[in-house]
Amino acid sequence: MKRLWTLLSMVLLAGCTTPTLRGSADLGVVIERASGQLSLVDTSRREVYARIGGLGDLSHASVVFARDGRYAYVFGRDGGLSKVDLLEARIVKRVLQSGNAIGGAISQDGRIVVAQNYTPGGIKAFDAETLELLSEVPAEYAPGNFSKVVGLADLAGQRFAYALFDGGEVWISDFSDPRQPQTQRYPAGLQPYDGLVTPDGRHYLAGLFGEDGVALLDTWRSEQGTRRILGNYGRGEEKLPVFKMPHLRGWSMAQGNAYLPAIGRHEVLVVAGSNWQEIAHIAVKGQPVFVMARPDGRQVWVNYAFPDNGWVEVIDTLSGKIVKTLAPGRAILHMEFTPRGEQVWISARDDNRVLIYDTATFTKLGELEVQAPSGIFFTSRANRMGF
Amino acid sequence: MKRLWTLLSMVLLAGCTTPTLRGSADLGVVIERASGQLSLVDTSRREVYARIGGLGDLSHASVVFARDGRYAYVFGRDGGLSKVDLLEARIVKRVLQSGNAIGGAISQDGRIVVAQNYTPGGIKAFDAETLELLSEVPAEYAPGNFSKVVGLADLAGQRFAYALFDGGEVWISDFSDPRQPQTQRYPAGLQPYDGLVTPDGRHYLAGLFGEDGVALLDTWRSEQGTRRILGNYGRGEEKLPVFKMPHLRGWSMAQGNAYLPAIGRHEVLVVAGSNWQEIAHIAVKGQPVFVMARPDGRQVWVNYAFPDNGWVEVIDTLSGKIVKTLAPGRAILHMEFTPRGEQVWISARDDNRVLIYDTATFTKLGELEVQAPSGIFFTSRANRMGF
């Protein structure tokens, strides 16, 4: 009888070991670059609630989220695409989709996950549920010539925009029929190295490595083709030493203006969103990497390339002045705001810490132990275009 | 022994009857006005997955969401404030907080829920976790005179803005210390009847019933006080017959412009967000009620007051023209977009149906049986300011 009870209580325990019931709208992941792990975080409790390994090479990894906020799709540098269940804290599915990849995106309706690849160059579309391969678009810009793909971003209507580094073009592929994508091509310029779509999903911008300026495509009027904006944006005639080409994903829109890192200079540039003319530049402590607007656009937070990567500065967009200088830790790599902007989470890689600040008071609200943290991604990205 | 087994299997079943594990970022609620019920919906599966009763008088009810997307706070007309668990599909807590109420809001950090009341006039702040009363601000605009409160909206920094119908003022209360709110008062005009905050949380607008024009407060520079904009907006000198004063929550910002229902006229007004000057008016089929922008701002969807409340029209913001006219059903009361705008959900009260449309193709994707549906609210509102 006693045995029976023991057995039964074991059955009871096993049968009931379901994960804690919790909402998914306040969750997120932090990339642990060195160990190939993810820390799963809860921004309400401000805690790491689980860690997951087995994700392969996570240097330069990026993450998108399913529309239910439950699943994270993790794109590794090694071409690994992993679907992680944030509620059960486990890898649901993992495919090695190419040899060398650099991020991905998810369709407006959440049904298609697309990876962008360096080798072989192109994009691949997967069923978001099963990770079954649906179709691919090889980046063959000329017969037999394949390009690295960069700057992949989702657009309205199951479309994706991306740039061809070697091909010098912007392509838009429409996956309305997921197995038969339709692709349009537009000239971009020499060596586009990254791209972004504006928060409204309308304008696609591709930064150029091989020449100055930025290619702009109005995706609502894509028949008009690309045009060149910000003619002086780039490494310039003198080819300044650039420690790190800033990602275009480090640009922000706030109060109708774009805030962007100058390349090779200690400046944040302010550009009018209406005509893309530079209207101001703000002197800062180093070469900016991420220039991130708080969701309401009142503040812009800036971090820097080595050797200034211990600083974070906060620009007040109303006055155009720096209102706060912080030294949160060593090797500040990334910043992520909670959806309504009351907190910002900052990764300090060399301190093995994620720091949480109140954006109104600049008080430190907490710090979490995370091994060599880099990218921080919250599930609220599922609700946004271009994220 | 058999009894024991029966008992044990019952324990097993009971112990393991946990709700289905699911993400909360794609959930929502539909108000069933007549029956005092909520339909809980899933926008990925496009289904009603549960119904909840016992919520009291739900005419004119409104809903806000916890930052985890798991809990809905339902404000009833009868002063009832109910906290509903969307995962367990049950009422967790319910208080009758006043005799006559008209909606509420949730603080930027998600810790404080505030209700606005007609009788007795004022606002009350509750702990979002427990619904414990934290503090109240009676709307005593002159000694012994209390006002109905309308247009409550959350601002950055634990602040809330609202308007006093009888007092003719806009108040901002700061709940940084939740038990000791600090309130600032600003003149508004005659009988403000509703209010809204712009999507960036910066500008608070109060519509006036007693005179034409709208009171505007820049909450980033609230020391500058209110000013009057849209001097002709209102019922006008002739006091046009107005079937329904449109909510200010039916206004939208899209591509830098505000789209708003003309009062008493068959027009949608387009106003520049930069200077609040009218730049266009678009002829439509009836007196507009909700003028709702798709999240990317490319389309604006409009419904109408009786007798034109069977129509929905879609304005293309690029051309300024109506590109689609739909007749989704009888008594169209509300519309809600999925966060990235690929679907719109429309309530047709007199058909007892919620209709789901693809916003790119205008194809009907589905319809759900819901008793006399009115307001539709998706959890993505948790991530937005002023919702």
Image (cartoon, coloured by chain):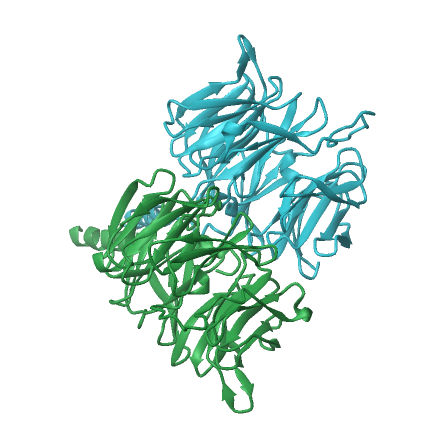
Chain colours: A green, B cyan
Quarter of the rendering containing residue A53: bottom left
Left or right for A344, reference B169: left
Q: Where is residue A13 shown, x and y percent of the image?
A: 26, 52
Residue positioned most to the right:
B238
Image-based side of A11 in relation to B213, left or right: left
The spot of residue A57 in percent (x, y) is: 31, 72
Number of numbered discs visible in the structure rendering: 0
Is residue A309 visible to the viewer in this orientation of the structure? yes
Q: Residue furthest bottom?
A: A144
Residues B362 and A299: in front is A299
Q: Is residue A275 above or below residue B207?
A: below
Q: Nearer the viewer, residue B291 or A94?
A: B291
**Can you say whether A205 is above or below B132 in the image?**
below
A264 over B68 or under it: above or below: below
In this view, A80 is above or below A107: below
The answer to which image quadrant residue B63 occupies is top right
Q: Residue furthest top?
A: B144
Q: Residue at x 60, y 67 (%)?
A: A217
Q: Position of residue A220 (x, y in %)?
A: 65, 63
Q: Quadrant of residue B198?
A: top right
Image position, residue A42 (x, y; %): 34, 49
Residue at point 44% right, 48% down?
A294
**Residue projecting furthest to the left:** A2
* Relative depth, front residue between A78 and A95: A78
Q: Is residue A273 left or right of residue A2?
A: right
Residue B370 seen anywhere in this rendered image of the structure: no
Task: Identify the image quadrant of the C terminus of chain B.
Answer: top right
